[in-house]
Image: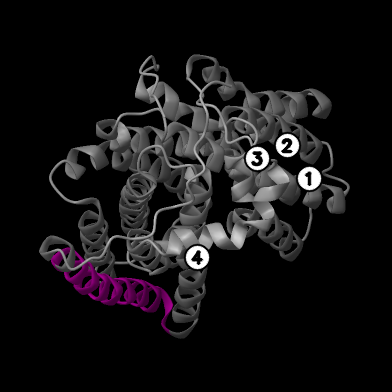
Amino acid sequence: MKKNHSVPPVWLMGLSNLTLGVVTGIVAFALPQLMAAERVPEWKIAAITAVAVSPSFWCVLFGPMLDVRFSRRWYATVLAGCAAVFTAIAFLSLHRLLLLELALTLANVSANLFGAALGGWLSTVIEEKDRNILSKWMNVALIGGMGIASTLGGELTRRLPISLAAGLMGLIVFLPTLTFLLIPAPGPDRRLAAESFGQFNREVLSLLRRRENVVVLLLFLSPCSSFALTNLLGGLGADFHASAREISLAGGVGEFVPAILGCFLFPIIARRLPLRFFYLANGVAGSLFTLGLIVLPHLTWTFALAVFGEFLFQAVAFSIQIGIVFDAIGSNNPLAATTFAFLTAATNVPLTYMMVADGRAYSAAGVAGAFSADASISIVACLAMGVLLAKFSSEASSGAVQPQEPAPTAQPSEGE
């Protein structure tokens, strides 16, 4: 496929991912806070949020749809529009919890598929040398979008009529698609979208027949660099004698600033380390930081330090993950969006089971138990994956790796 080199700056393309960030922030932060203000029971809020977050796993089943029939720009635009509509409906449904749960879930389905379409699309228009820079800016957009949603979601609903606030939040979700007008969109495979569902198993198997993808999948499924403690720290402030205001301040500034810093550090370090070993090194360094927190006094400044450090290492990990996915996709991959959806879905798995493990360790031994469990499991996983990667690299360099069966040969056509 001939590449169109007339593309906008990489940072502008990466900021297109704000749509996914805003919806993620609405699902995880804004609407749970609004439900709490409406005195919805905490168990009910948790249940609704859990259902709404679940598409990050299962929406991968629809990934193949994004690589056929229409351009990925078309899919990304339509899915952003769906996410905007369902977001507005969710804000209008605070007193109808069943509709709220359905709307939130559909908004998150649309946003996750949007992210897969966008990632698959951008991988076909950027130069190889720009992949890490694009990964940085996509993660900056994700984090920035979450911050926008967390800040504006509550403020708009408190200061404006709910119908106007809902419409504005929907508009904010869709607004980043304006950048699409500047980005070239290679034409799609002209198969019918319906055909791709029947071929899903074959396409996934074709991905798994490539050892590169299997190694990446194992890396992402392992707890090497998950830093799941970031999802628990908000509830541990009392253990560090932090007030509600101090917890809120640490959770706001202590999340956003190090996360952005981590995204900007990623391409600098990635120039000196192979991405996969960088991923393991980040996991080990972050785990040693976590272990170091155990010996510090349980005071507010320790809590703030924990929040800052854990989010810093997690942001670097997220950026590395996207960079690795772009490398796995390669150039002119007819299954680019499928591969992006499949591999990024895997990164959410360790976040879930490590939260369970850390929670059980906290119940058994408090903060020290949670921190030591999270760090020790990660270090062991990093060492195991390091041995596997070294073996794989050795085989590749000696020519022991046999040519893998290529992905399906359907080639996208030129033009829209």
- Which residue has dot 3 on it? 191
Q: CA distance from mark 2 to mark 1?
A: 7 Å
Quarter holding the C terminus is top right
Question: Mostly what secondary structure, the magenta segment?
Answer: helix
Q: Is residue 64 left or right of residue 15?
A: right
Residue placed at 50% from the left, 64% from the top?
Answer: 205
- Return the disc, 4 or 1, that comes first in the chain's sequence: 1
Q: Nearer the viewer, mark 3 or mark 4?
A: 3
- Circle 3/circle 4 CB separation < 8 Å: no
In terms of sequence position, does the residue under pointer 3 or pointer 2 come before the other? 2
* Amino acid on which disc 3 is placed: Arg
Labels 1 and 3: the sequence-earlier one: 1
- Alpha carbon distance from label 3 to label 2: 31 Å
Magenta span: 365-394
Q: For the residue carrying disc 4, how many other residues have a C-alpha within 10 Å: few (<14), some (14-19), or many (20+)?
A: some
Mark 4 and mark 1: span between their CA atoms? 24 Å
